[in-house]
Image (spheres, grey):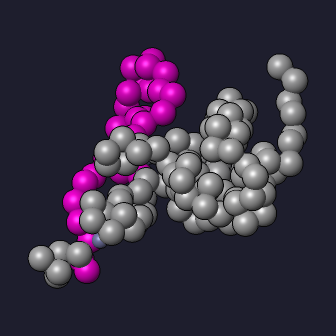
Amino acid sequence: MQVRNTKQKKHIISILKKSNRPLSINEIYNKIIYELPRIAKSTIYRNIDLLLEQNLIEKYYFNDNEIFYLYKERDSDHTHFIICDDCKKIYNLPSCPLREIENSIKAEGFIIKNHQIQITGICKSCALKI
Ligand SMILES: [Zn+2]
Ligand SMILES: [Zn+2]
């Protein structure tokens, strides 16, 4: 497959690189329209698919099945995130708790491609508002 390095794709990569948390398509769109006011959301979707194919970004599923994307710094390290149901603020898990479990599954000969951790709930400041 020919790798096209379009202007749109470069902008999307730079937006994702600058962010320390995963971004949804809408969030990417709201940032990119300052630089490329005529960009269509379908173009963002298409470029995101390319970046996923090239393994440059990672997909995260949060509540309501909204999908977020994070730029991959290295293959080996990854972060898990929790999103507040209410204010949608995103928090990092301090570390991946699945490494040991993965290692024992790998020892059984299972090839793990990816894993996800989903924790739902509301953050401290939203909990105080109730
Ligand atoms: Zn909150
Ligand atoms: Zn993990």
Determine if the magenta segment contains residue 41.
no
Q: Nearer the viewer, residue 39 or 98?
A: 39
Name the residue rendered at 38%, 27% in the picture. Answer: 105
Q: Is residue 71 left or right of residue 21?
A: right
Q: Nearer the viewer, residue 104 or 85?
A: 85
The location of residue 99, given as percent across then percent down, is 42, 44
Name the residue rendered at 35%, 58% in the picture. Answer: 82
Name the residue rendered at 39%, 68% in the picture. Answer: 89
> Where is ligand 1, by quadrant?
bottom left
Asked if 63 appears above or below 108 in the picture, the reply is below
Asked if 87 appears above or below 33 in the picture, the reply is below
Q: Is residue 11 left or right of residue 72?
A: right
Q: Which residues are magenta?
A: 96-125
Q: Nearer the viewer, residue 126 or 33?
A: 33
Q: Quadrant of residue 56?
A: top right
Q: Say if residue 51 shows up in the picture.
A: no
Q: Quadrant of residue 86?
A: bottom left
The location of residue 107, given as percent across then percent down, is 42, 25
Determine if the magenta segment contains residue 119.
yes
The location of residue 119, given as percent across then percent down, is 27, 52
Seen as rendered, the residue at the extreme left is 130
Image quarter hosting the C terminus: bottom left
Q: Is residue 63 left or right of residue 122?
A: right
Q: Say if residue 68 shows up in the picture.
A: yes
Q: Nearer the viewer, residue 28 or 22?
A: 28
